[in-house]
Image (cartoon, grey):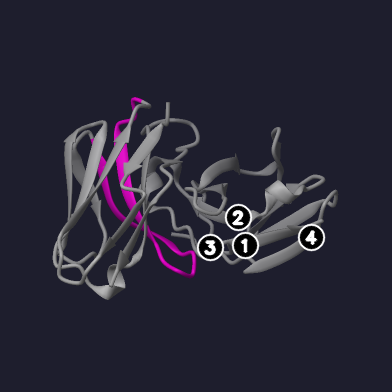
Amino acid sequence: LAKTTQPISMDSYEGQEVNITCSHNNIATNDYITWYQQFPSQGPRFIIQGYKTKVTNEVASLFIPADRKSSTLSLPRVSLSDTAVYYCLVGDMSNTGKLIFGQGTTLQVKP
Amino acid sequence: DTAVSQTPKYLVTQMGNDKSIKCEQNLGHDTMYWYKQDSKKFLKIMFSYNNKELIINETVPNRFSPKSPDKAHLNLHINSLELGDSAVYFCASSHRGTDTGELFFGEGSRLTVL
């Protein structure tokens, strides 16, 4: 299973764009990159998933370079309610239970 | 309706006691999981059941015993509770074969062992 490395914490201000980068040097051919968001006192929630290039949805964008050894979650114009822990996961979608969540990145959005 | 619901949300008990946490999902998923989240936010899988069959059993003490009476329920029973069992336990579910393998989590059950 590919191990991921991401910053433990980040600070931002309301209205700014936030980019959280995750390293996954040992990503396998069948692996997808998935990001989850966890608010305090709640379970993690799926945000976005991608395999290569760029994926965008109503919540975030995910940028994946050609070598796929890293990925960047981009949150446009964050608000206070985006304060949460963000987890980067890498793995084969046919074996979801084996995904490793790691420690995540705690994003603190300030007014 | 809550998609994945766990009870109780909070549980405070003494060392040596036995306790259970219940989980139910109404999403029609065929796979359910138990995760443990420690104080450092690491989320580690403990068990996974697919169609009531145990498919993942990570290195977890025998004091932890999952039970799945049907596809919609996965309960966790813990015997002889220890201080180190204090954590937040999350139940999750998914449907095998979906495009994203998305996990749906409950709100967690915070267990405090005194």
Q: Let me know if marks 2 and 3 both belong to one chain.
A: yes
Tally of numbered tags: 4
Q: Disc 1 on helix, strand or loop? A: strand
Q: Earlier in the sequence, mark 1 or mark 4?
A: 4
Evaluate whether label 4 is on the same chain as label 3: yes
The residue under label 1 is A105
Residue drawn at point x = 44 percent, y = 58 percent? A100
Q: Quadrant of the C terminus of chain B?
A: bottom left
Q: Are marks 2 and 1 in contact (CB under 8 Å)?
A: yes
Image position of A58 with respect to B43: above or below:
above
Predominant secondary structure in magenta? strand
Mark 1 or 4, closer to the camera: 4
Three-letter residue code for mark 1: Thr
Q: CA distance from mark 2 to mark 3?
A: 20 Å
Residue A23 appears in the rendering: no
Residue at horizontal 24%, vertical 41%?
B74
Please say if the residues under marks 1 and 4 sit with CB atoms less than 8 Å apart.
no
For the residues beneath circles 2 and 1, the answer to whether they share a chain is yes
Q: Earlier in the sequence, mark 2 or mark 1?
A: 2
The kind of secondary structure element at disc 2 is strand
Q: Amino acid at mark 3?
A: Asn
Specify which label sits upstream in the sequence, 3 or 1.
Answer: 3
Residue located 58% across and 64% down the image: A25
Q: Looking at the picture, which amino acid does disc 2 mark?
A: Tyr
Given this view, does label 4 or label 2 mark the residue nearer the observer? 4
The numbered disc on residue A86 is: 2
